[in-house]
Amino acid sequence: MLIRKQDYPERSDLVICTVTKIQFNSIFVRLDEYDKKQGIIHISEISPGRIRNIRDYVKEGKVIVCVVLRVNMERDLIELSLRRVTESQRRNKINGMKQEQKAEKIIEFVAKSQKKGSKELLDHIIQKITPDYDSINGFFEDVVSGAASLNELKLDKKTTDLLNDTISQRIKPPEVIIKGRFELKSLQSNAIEVIKEALKKAKDIGKDNLAIVYQGAGRYDVSLKSGDYKSAENILDTIVSTVEEHMKKMKGEFSFERTDK
C-alpha cells in the first residue's frame, strides 16, 4: 500500500502506473501513488518508431513507470509518456516501490508480534508522518540516520522498541551512486599539472564520496555516492562546473557526459 497523494503530480515527475484500458491509439492508466487519479498515454508516447500493435508493449494490469507531460485539472486527466523514461529512471522508481513494500512488511511483522491489526498500525503511521513524508520507507530511513524519531508516532513503548529494533536490522541508510565521464585535454607545457589541479578541485568537492578512475586518452570516469539523488545531482553539478571553469581558464579542452542514464 503506497501512501496515496491527494493532489496532482507535477510536470516531469516520474509516476508508477497500472494499465487499466487499452484502445487503438492510447492507453489509460491508474496512478498508483495518487488517490483516484487517471492518466493517458498517446500511442506516440509509448515507444520510439512505428507501433503496429500497442499490446506488444503493454497489457492490462501491467505496472509501468511514466513521466508526466501535462496535467489537465479540468478534465482530471494526466498526460504521460512511457518512451521518455530512461532505464535508470525506471529502475530507480521501481526500486523505490520495492523499498516501500519492504517498509510495509516491517509494520506487518511488528503488528503481528504485538497482536495488533496491521492495517490499523499502518494507517496510524501514515497519518502521523503525512504530510512531512510521502513514503514510509523515507521516514524509516530518517529514523536510521537519526534525522527522525519513532517517538513522533506516539505508540506504546513495546511497539516503539520492537519497531525500532526491526527497522535497524532491515533498513540500511540510503545510498545512491551517479556516474559520468570527463574528457580533459591541454596543450600547455604543464598539461599534466593543469589536469591534476582540475581533478583535485573535483575531489575537494566530492571528498571521500567521489571516485575518479583514469581510462586513458584524457578520459576520467567518476562516480559519486550520496544519501539521495537530489543531493548527488547538486554536488555533481558543482563538480562539473568547477572543472569546466578551471579547464577554460587554463585554455584546455573539457567535456562531460553522464554514463548512468
Image (spheres, grey):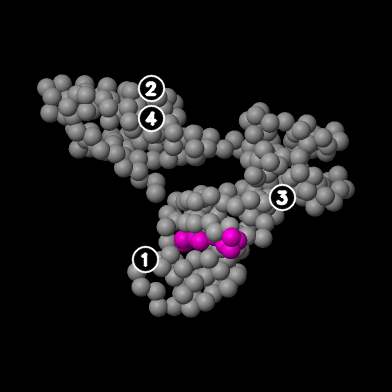
The answer to which quarter of the image holds residue 52 is bottom left
> Is 77 contained in the magenta span?
yes
- Residue at (51%, 61%) from the top-left corner? 79
The answer to whether 123 appears left or right of 4 in the picture is right
Amino acid type at circle 2 is Asp
Question: Is residue 46 positioned above or below 136 on the image?
Answer: below
- Residue at (76%, 44%) from the top-left corner? 127
- Range of residues picked out in magenta: 74-82
Q: How crowded is the residue under tag 3: few (<14 C-alpha within 10 Å), some, or many (20+)?
A: few
Name the image quarter holding the N terminus.
bottom right
- Of the two numbered discs 3 and 2 in the rendering, the one whose residue sits closer to the viewer: 2
- Of the two numbered discs 4 and 2 in the rendering, the one whose residue sits closer to the viewer: 4
Amino acid type at circle 3 is Lys
- Residue at (86%, 36%) from the top-left corner? 156
Q: Is residue 48 visible?
A: yes
Name the outermost residue toward the front.
74
Residue 10, position in %: x, y? Answer: 53, 50
Residue named by callout 4: 238
State how far apart marks 3 and 4 are (Cα).
39 Å
Residue named by callout 2: 204
State how far apart marks 1 and 3 are (Cα).
38 Å
State how far apart marks 2 and 1 are (Cα).
41 Å
Residue named by callout 1: 48
Would you say the residues marked 3 and 4 are in contact, meaning their CB atoms lie under 8 Å apart? no
Residue 76, position in %: x, y? Answer: 60, 61
Would you say the residues marked 3 and 2 are in contact, meaning their CB atoms lie under 8 Å apart? no
